[in-house]
Image (tube, rainbow, N blue to C red):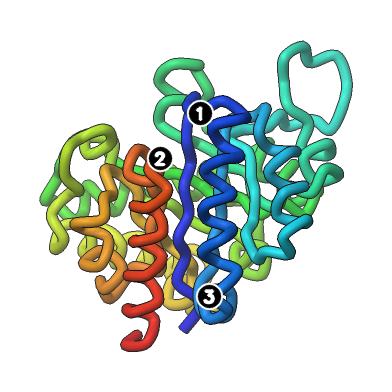
C-alpha cells in the first residue's frame, strides 16, 4: 500500500504573510511527528507568490512537505506574458503542479489539449502532476461515468506510459460537490474511484489501476476526512477551504495516520 496522501490547494487565498504563519504552525507540529513523514505524503499548494518562501521555509525546518503550484505553462520559457514556467517551478524547489481543475476549464477556457501539453511539461521538469478529473453532475449510471472519466483521463495521458503514470496523482473532484458544505456520499465516491481504476487497467494494463494514487477532493472537512481516507479505493484527500484553518489540516493528518495503520 502506498502512503496515504494529505494535500491542500488554496486557490486565490491567503497573503504570503498569512501563509507563512499557517506553515509555521504546521512545521511546529510536524517537528515532533516523525511518523507523519514515514507514513503520509503531505503537500501544500498555496497561491503563486507564496511558493518560493514556502519552499525555503520547508528547507529551513527540514520538513518532508512538498510544495506545488496551482497551474503552469506548457512551455519552459518564452513570450508567454503572465504564465508560470514549469522549469522555473522545478528550479525553485517546487515538487507538484495541479492540472485540469474545473475552474481553469470553466473560467479560463483551458481545454484538454492544453492540459495534455502541461502534463508533458510537468514530466519534462520532474514535477509531480496532480490531474483533476470529475463529472459535472451527479450520475449513478456507471457506463456514463466510466466514459466521462475515460475521456478526461485519456485526453491528457495518452502520451504517457504506465511508468509515467506512477508519478501522477489523480484527484477525483466531482464538480457538483466542489464548494459545498459536505462531501459527495461515501458509497458514490468509492464507486467512482473504482470506475477510474477500471479505466486505467483497461487503457494502460500492468495493473495500473490497482496501484494508481487516486485522491478525493470536493468539500473535504475534518468531519468527513476519516471516512474518506478509509474508503477502499481511496489513497488520500485533496483539501480546499477545510485546510485554510491549519488546526483542521493537522486534524486531517492525524486521521490519516490513524487510518494508515489499518490499510
- Tag 3, which secondary structure? loop
Mark 2 or 3 closer to N-term?
Answer: 3
Q: Are marks 2 and 1 in contact (CB under 8 Å)?
A: yes
Q: Quadrant of residue 257?
A: bottom left
As drawn, 33 above or below 236:
below
Which residue of the protein is positioned furthest toward the bottom in this rendering? 262
Q: Position of residue 56 (x, y in %)?
A: 77, 47
Which residue matches tag 2?
A: 244
Q: Quadrant of residue 224?
A: bottom left
Which residue occupies the foreground of this view, 42 or 118?
A: 42
Q: Residue at x 55, y 74 (%)?
A: 32
Which residue matches tag 3?
A: 33
Q: Position of residue 114 (x, y in %)?
A: 61, 29
Which residue occupies the foreground of this view, 131 or 18?
A: 18
Q: Residue at x 48, y 66 (%)?
A: 213
- Tag 2, which secondary structure? loop
Mark 2 or 1 closer to N-term?
Answer: 1
Q: Is residue 66 left or right of residue 79?
A: left
Q: Position of residue 197 (x, y in %)?
A: 38, 67
Which residue matches tag 1?
A: 14
Amino acid at each position: 500500500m502506498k502512503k496515504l496522501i494529505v494535500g491542500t490547494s488554496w486557490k486565490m487565498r491567503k497573503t504570503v504573510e498569512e501563509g507563512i504563519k499557517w506553515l509555521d504552525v504546521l512545521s511546529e507540529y510536524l517537528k515532533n511527528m516523525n511518523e507523519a513523514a514515514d507514513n503520509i505524503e503531505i503537500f501544500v499548494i498555496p497561491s503563486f507568490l507564496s511558493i518560493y518562501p514556502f519552499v525555503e521555509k520547508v528547507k529551513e525546518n527540514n520538513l518532508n512537505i512538498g510544495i506545488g503550484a496551482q497551474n503552469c505553462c506548457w512551455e519552459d520559457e518564452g513570450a508567454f506574458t503572465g504564465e508560470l514556467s514549469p522549469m522555473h517551478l522545478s528550479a525553485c524547489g517546487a515538487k507538484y503542479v495541479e492540472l485540469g481543475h474545473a475552474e481553469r476549464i470553466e473560467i479560463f477556457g483551458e481545454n484538454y489539449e492544453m492540459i495534455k501539453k502541461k502534463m508533458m511539461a510537468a514530466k519534462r521538469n520532474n514535477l509531480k502532476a496532480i490531474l483533476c478529473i470529475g463529472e459535472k453532475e451527479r450520475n449513478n449510471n456507471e457506463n456514463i461515468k466510466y466514459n466521462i472519466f475515460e475521456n478526461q483521463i485519456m485526453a491528457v495521458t495518452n502520451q504517457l506510459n504506465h511508468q509515467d503514470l506512477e508519478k501522477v496523482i489523480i484527484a477525483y473532484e466531482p464538480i457538483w460537490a466542489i464548494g459545498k458544505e459536505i462531501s459527495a456520499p461515501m458509497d458514490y465516491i468509492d464507486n467512482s474511484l473504482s470506475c477510474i481504476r477500471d479505466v486505467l487497467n483497461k487503457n494502460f494494463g500492468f495493473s495500473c489501476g490497482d496501484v494508481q494514487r487516486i485522491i478525493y477532493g470536493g468539500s473535504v472537512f475534518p468531519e468527513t476526512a476519516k471516512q474518506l481516507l478509509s474508503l477502499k479505493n481511496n489513497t488520500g484527500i485533496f483539501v480546499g477551504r477545510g485546510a485554510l484553518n491549519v488546526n483542521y489540516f493537522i486534524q486531517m493528518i492525524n486521521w490519516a495516520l490513524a487510518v494508515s495503520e489499518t490499510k
